[in-house]
Image: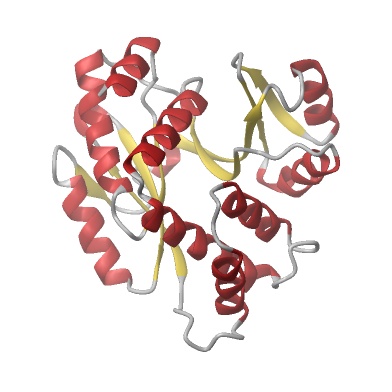
Amino acid sequence: MSGHSKWSTIKRKKGAADAKRGAIFTRLAREISIASRDGGGDPETNFRLRLAVDKARAENMPKDNIERAIKKGTGEDKEGGNWEEMVLEGYGPNGSAIMAVCVTDNRNRTISDVRHAFSKGGNMAEAGAVGWQFDRKSYFSFPSTAMNFDKAFELGIEAGADDVFDHGDTIEIYGAVESFKTIADALHKSNVQPAEAGLSFVAKQEIELGVEETLQVMKMIEGLEELDDVQDVYHNVKMSDEVLAALENA
């Protein structure tokens, strides 16, 4: 868990360097559509949509794209796909456990693509076979320049968070699923824009592998993340400083 924010930062840097804007915008559009479908098209009353829109703006997604994604979710745009969320789980290399959160308009295609990605060093599992190793949590991360740790700790605890972590340049807040809106609102009122915000799968217990073994797991995860229908991937492998350095230099 401790390496999550650092690895996310590395991924964002690599994504920008590789100019994968199309794939980023596609994922963001789906996230916005799902949020507006479930909670309405007004970001002021739909906190999940507000965070999705904030994330899209942070990635410089054009305003027209954002508005079109909202209309697809609310049904105003009849050309919108019938998106649904699904969580697929499996085993990666070296005994690792992996959860893949997908948004799709074709379950069979997604399951086939994810199964193929898992087959490269592991295998997809039945629902629940891996999921018991994770807790569903509200998750927020933001730069420590936006708010110092003492203030973040106080804000988090008052808003119902379970844990607040200081990683130097990044602060993370974890809480129960039910506390998501309360924490999101508290950050919004404090003018803190999260770099990441959402419902995350957090490993109950991380496993520690060697650098090479961890890189094998991350190679599979990168393969999953490259799939169009995959939004987020979570795992139970501890991200040591040596591993993060190897990933950054890869």
Q: Quadrant of residue 136?
A: top right
Q: Position of residue 42 (x, y in %)?
A: 75, 69
Where does the image place residue 151, in percent across and percent down from the top left? Answer: 82, 21
Classify 157 as above or below 109.
above
Q: Residue at x 33, y 35 (%)?
A: 97
Picture residue at 45% right of the left edge, 24% below the top: 205
Q: Is the residue 187 above or below the residue 164 in the image?
A: below
Q: Of residues 157 and 222, which is closer to you in this image?
A: 222
Q: Is residue 73 left or right of residue 80?
A: right
Disc tally is 0
* Residue 91 visible somewhere in the drawing: no
**What is the residue that sits farthest to the top in this orientation?**
242
Relative to 178, 87 lies left or right? left
Q: Is residue 184 visible?
A: yes
Where residue 49 appears, as percent x and y from the top left, is 66, 60
**Where does residue 3 sit, x and y in percent of width and height?**
46, 21
Farthest residue to the left: give it: 120
